[in-house]
Amino acid sequence: MVKSRSIGSRILYAANVLVLFIFALSCIYPFWYTFSLSISRKSAANAGLVTFYPIGFTLSSYKEIISDIKFFNSFWISIQRTVLGTSLSLLVAIMMAYPLSKTKKEFKARNIFMWILIFCMLFNGGLIPWYITVKSYKLLDTIWALVLGGSVPVFNVILLMNFFRNFPDDIEEAAIIDGSGPWRTLFTVIVPCSLPAIATVTLFNGVYHWNEFFNGLVLMSNETKYPLQTYIQQLVVNIPTDTELTPDQYKRLSELSNKSLDAAKVFISIIPMLVVYPFLQKYFVSGIMLGAVKE
Amino acid sequence: MKTRRIIVEKHYYLMMLPGMLWLVLFSIVPMSGIIMAFQDYNPGKGIFRSKWIGMENFRYLMQLDDSKQVIINTLIISVGKIIFNLLVSLVFALMLNEIRNLKYKKFVQTVVFLPHFISWVVMSTIVIGVFGYTGVINAIMGWFGREPYLFMADASIFRQLVIGTEVWKEFGYNAVIFLAALTSINPNLYEAAAIDGANRLQSTWYITLPGLASTIVLLGVLSLGNVLNAGFDQVYNLYNPLVYSTGDILDTWIYRLGLQNLQYSLATAAGLFKSAVSFIMITVSYILAYKFADYKVF
């Protein structure tokens, strides 16, 4: 390619490197900011002195959390729903994707099922009918409302289906000739060979369940049943939405909370995400390309 | 052989069963609740005995000043997000593509990808902190002698704030598709252009951008389905009554109408309006994507 380069293009290149660095910095800053707040002295944090680095290093916020039963309760609920929700929807998605990856010749009702799924992905009854339905099943205040409430992740089914479709027929046929039924073929031959797709779907679901706060807010009637995100939402951003408010009141309300303690809670809630992030990055890229659409 | 196929098919149905059951219970049964949009729904009486009032709820909604403003807000925010998400992630991908130091490239890509995986609940605590009275923005403004300003309470900049923070959170993620498309451009083209004396800007303009055109069009078309989706999670966690005039969107409005003011029928009607329009837009966008870009979603 071009070997001798003019001064102008060098300046342009340096500017490019610099701008990208600022982009990157802006994406790290929030994490650094939250972390700094969480290890700063309470008075400094509440007075808003912490902007770029911690002031008055202390771990008292983290010590305070250790004895906070409500926080750990919500943390536990989040773990439960993430594990249950992720594994359940993965299992269901695998079981649906396999028959749907067959041709119409092999599975006659395939197209009918496919259309039902697509319709359910594109159309929904809306918030209120959904809420009343879940309520009528007597699921409010149970973990199952959080696990099942979001319905079938159709997008995952389609993603897995596309992956299974590209599975070489020869291997599957060999398994069938050896006397393997459809269940055994699916779980002992196809699933072990589809780990990248399954990892993608698992991570999609895991992130969804960990980050989801709205179902917790709507379907749980009291704070002892809130998942972690809902707990944090109520704690930090809770500004009354139904009353009149003046700018001064807003300012006072937003200054009311214990900022370093809140930041410590927020930071702990991000840690699981940071731990799985290397895997996320590896598989999400292939996942996006596989589906090439976002949910 | 034929009997074997029938037996196998039976197992296929069995495999579909749990998923279909889940779908029926949590997607299809709620759809029947749409009837409430045409009723004067009374929770005590239930769906079967509430009074049928036809299109009255929709007529009432159309008359409200609120509903018009909410739809305008939704459209401005969502269209702004669609445009700037495309634009910023495209520019970012092009800039990153110019970097020749692979380690630096990898570092930038890793970092900008991160905010996508953090929930809006957490992000909004950070955004509110950063734009708060004592946040970084005010600190920097302070260096230039400006008085601290309460950004989050200013209705005139709320939409820009929502669009800006969304683009900031998602540009790294959205750039992935562009970065992948960039690798599929034939490198011989760049060499040929360099021999012909083209500089990097020229080769970007005449080779890279046309090479990405189909991806840009495709992403634009597919995002049409989101015109009534301005992002509930984000707005709900960032807004406050002071910015309702510009920041209240369909989803947040429906939520307050239905679950806080308990106007079930009105909220269902508004929700149905949103679902129906979105459904039509997505279907049209998929058809367009298939026709023009030969892109098959299913």
Image (cartoon, coloured by chain):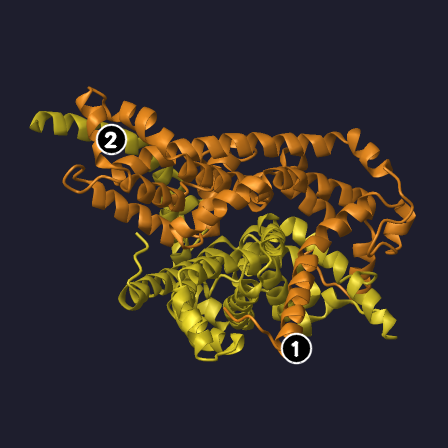
Chain colours: A orange, B yellow
Q: Residues within 10 Å of mark 1 (few under 14, many from 20)?
A: few
Q: Is residue B134 above or below residue A98?
A: below
What is the total number of numbered labels drawn onto the structure image? 2
Lateral position of residue A167 relative to residue A75, left or right: left
Cβ–Cβ under 8 Å for marks 1 and 2: no
Q: Note whether residue A243 is visible.
A: yes
Residue B4's image quarter?
A: top left
Q: Which amino acid lies under the numbered mark 2 shown in the image of this protein?
A: Ile
Tell me the residue at 58%/41% (across/down): A278
In the image, farthest residue toward the front: A4
Q: Position of residue A220 (x, y in %)?
A: 59, 38
Residue A7 tag number: 1
Q: Residues within 10 Å of mark 2 (few under 14, many from 20)?
A: few
Which element carries disc 2, helix, strand or loop? helix
Question: Gap in Å between the C-alphas at discs 1 and 2?
Answer: 59 Å
Q: Which amino acid lies under the numbered mark 1 shown in the image of this protein?
A: Ile
Tell me the residue at 62%/61% (across/down): B168
Camera-side residue: B103 or A290?
A: B103
Name the residue carrying label 2. Answer: A171
Q: Position of residue A217 (x, y in %)?
A: 60, 44
| Chain at tag 1 | A
Residue B172 tag number: none
Tell me the residue at 72%/42% (across/down): A267
